[in-house]
Image (tube, rainbow, N blue to C red):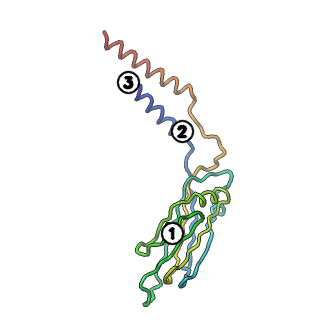
Amino acid sequence: MKRLLVLSMLISAFMVSGAGATTYTWTDYISFDPEYIGHWDSFSYTHDLTDNADPFNPGDDWLSDYYLEIALHDDGGNRDYFEVAYIYQPGQDLLDGFYDFSYNNNTFGWTLTGLAFLNEFGTLDVSITSLWGDFYLDYSNLVATGSDNALTPIPNPEPSTFLLLGSGLVGLAWYGRKRKKS
């Protein structure tokens, strides 16, 4: 009886979790030609999710997550021993923005302030600062996920569906228990 009750609860939870709105992904890819960033220079740009073919609509759509992928590479100078770059986005902790030149590109996670700016305006400001050395910026890619048209009601199964499923499972449990006694 207990197993059947647990099984019915798991099935109900699975049906409820599958009833949510579908997730949607918006991307904004900026290719630079590449952009040269010299010693102790900074370069700023803005990702805009509202100017795509299928745009993000602040107020109608809702973002729950994003990440930022940036590709920098060394300029190949013979006096460069190593480069240190700092990537800044709104609300970022001080230690989270250092770029590691040993990778082809680096991915930076979301910040609460950045997510708020994206939901409010559909844009994200990014700054790259050379703390040591000079390098090139190849591209920046912003990938954001969320609900398309968040004001649309999310379809949920009717309560009668769960009542019917639950009563059927309880009936099976009762029948199995009665049969077991005889």
- Give percent across and percent down for residue 15: 49, 35
- Marks 3 and 2, the one that precedes in the sequence: 3
- Marks 1 and 3, the one that precedes in the sequence: 3
Marks counted in the figure total: 3
Image quarter hosting the N terminus: top left
For label 3, the crowd category at 10 Å Cα-Cα, with few meaning under 14, some 14 to 19 and many 20 or more, is few
Q: Secondary structure at mark 2?
A: loop
User: Which residue is under mark 1?
Assistant: 97
For label 1, the crowd category at 10 Å Cα-Cα, with few meaning under 14, some 14 to 19 and many 20 or more, is some
- Mark 2: amino acid: Ala
Q: Is residue 44 above or below residue 107?
A: below
- Mark 3: amino acid: Lys
Q: Residue at x 50, y 39 (%)?
A: 17
Left or right of 5: which side holds 88?
Answer: right
Q: CA distance from mark 2 to mark 1?
A: 37 Å
Query: Can you name the residue that lies furthest to the front here?
Result: 94
Q: Residue at x 51, y 69 (%)?
A: 97
Q: CA distance from mark 3 to mark 2?
A: 26 Å
Q: Nearer the viewer, mark 1 or mark 3?
A: 1
Q: Secondary structure at mark 3?
A: helix
- Mark 1: amino acid: Gly
Q: Residue at x 47, y 84 (%)?
A: 75
Left or right of 68: which side holds 82?
Answer: left
User: Which residue is under mark 3?
Assistant: 2
Q: Is residue 136 above or below residue 145?
A: below
- Give percent across and percent down for residue 116: 63, 57
Q: CA distance from mark 1 to mark 3?
A: 51 Å
- Marks 2 and 1, the one that precedes in the sequence: 2
Query: Can you name the residue that lies furthest to the bottom here?
Result: 78
- Give percent across and percent down for residue 20: 55, 41
User: Which residue is under mark 2?
Assistant: 19
Left or right of 99: which side holds 35?
Answer: right
